[in-house]
Amino acid sequence: MARRRPEKILRWRIVAFLAIPLFEIVGRYRMRGLTHIPKRGAFVISPNHVTNFDPLTTAYLVWRGGRVPRFLAKASLFRVPVLGGLLRFTGQIPVERDGSGPDPLKAATRLLDEELAVIVYPEGTLTRDPDEWPMRGKSGAVRLALQHDIPLIPMAHWGVQRILPRYGGKLSLRRHDVDMLVGPPLDLSPWKGRTDAAAQAEATRVLMDEIARLLGELRGETPPAERWNPAEHGQSEWGTFTPPTR
């Protein structure tokens, strides 16, 4: 059997050495539940998605949990100067949102076959919920976990939106508190071996409810009973979105 390469390869250590001190200028990151991150083997971790700064905080949490973070990133980001080079340097996988590129789940399968940690935002984009609760999810994270029989880890964070507001704005250079909470692996046994759409939708609802529960614990509030559905409010789930003025 071929010996698997260590996850924390040199290039990741270089990125961490250069980026973390700068990253900690804008935030005090308080993490709980890191013991729920598997120390070895493939898994999927699924956080809520409030701002475009989220991937950095989630990656930092996974790194502090002793694993290398991997993303399925929008292909357009790979064409951004500097950022694109960094994404390629760290082994992230480009995904075309319009479906013209490789199947995202097949791309993620390569990472899982290498027993890596994969970050999948089940909402697929920034939440449209006006109060910044998780909205309805898509089934990608659940499908990956069920197909490969690997842990699916729910996670929530709060405070990142003070560093970079939702849908844009200026990066705040003040130091803000960011709270992060990792939950135990989701119990997927009721849907094990099932590939039908109904099972995937039901498991995804359970995942989103658990993410909302974790976020409620961080916020000290009770999350709404139902996840926000953009289609019911005439909202697109893709592209730039301007929330209504309240």
Image (cartoon, rainbow, N blue to C red):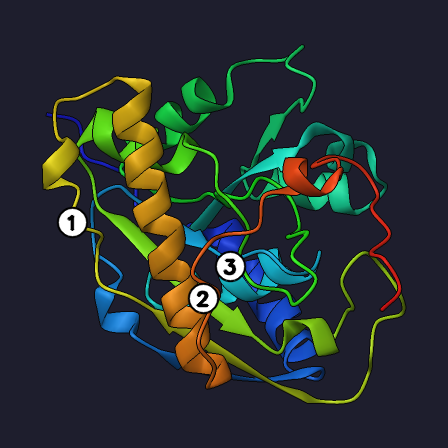
In the image, residue 59 sits, relative to residue 163, either above or below, namely: above
Residue type pointed to by label 1 = Asp
Rate crowding at label 1 as few (under 14), some (14 to 19) or many (20 or more) other CA atoms within 10 Å: some
Horizontal side, residue 205 vs residue 74: left or right: left
Q: Quadrant of the N terminus?
A: top left
At 48% from the left and 65% from the top, the residue drawn is: 224
Instruction: Give the percent coordinates (x, y) of residue 199.
Output: 25, 28
Please state which amino acid type lies under the numbered disc 2.
Ala
State how far apart marks 2 and 1 are (Cα).
Answer: 17 Å
* Residue, disc 2: 156
Residue 184 quadrant: bottom left
Which residue lies at the image location 33% right of the left edge and 59% below the top edge?
Answer: 210
Which circle, 2 or 3, is nearer the viewer?
2
Inter-mark Cα distance, 2 to 3: 13 Å
Q: Sequence order check: which comes first, mark 2 or mark 3? A: 3
Q: Is residue 114 visible?
A: no
Few, some or many C-alpha atoms within 10 Å of disc 3 (few <14, some 14-19, many ≥20)? some
Please provide percent x and percent y for residue 45. Answer: 37, 51
Residue position for label 3: 59
Q: Nearer the viewer, residue 86 or 24?
A: 24
Name the kind of residue labelled 3 in the image: Ala
Instruction: Write down the residue under mark 1.
Output: 187
Asked whether the residues under the numbered discs 1 and 3 touch, taking CB atoms below 8 Å apart as contact, a structural biologist would say no
Placement of the C terminus among the 4 image quadrants: bottom right
* Secondary structure of the residue carrying numbered label 3: helix
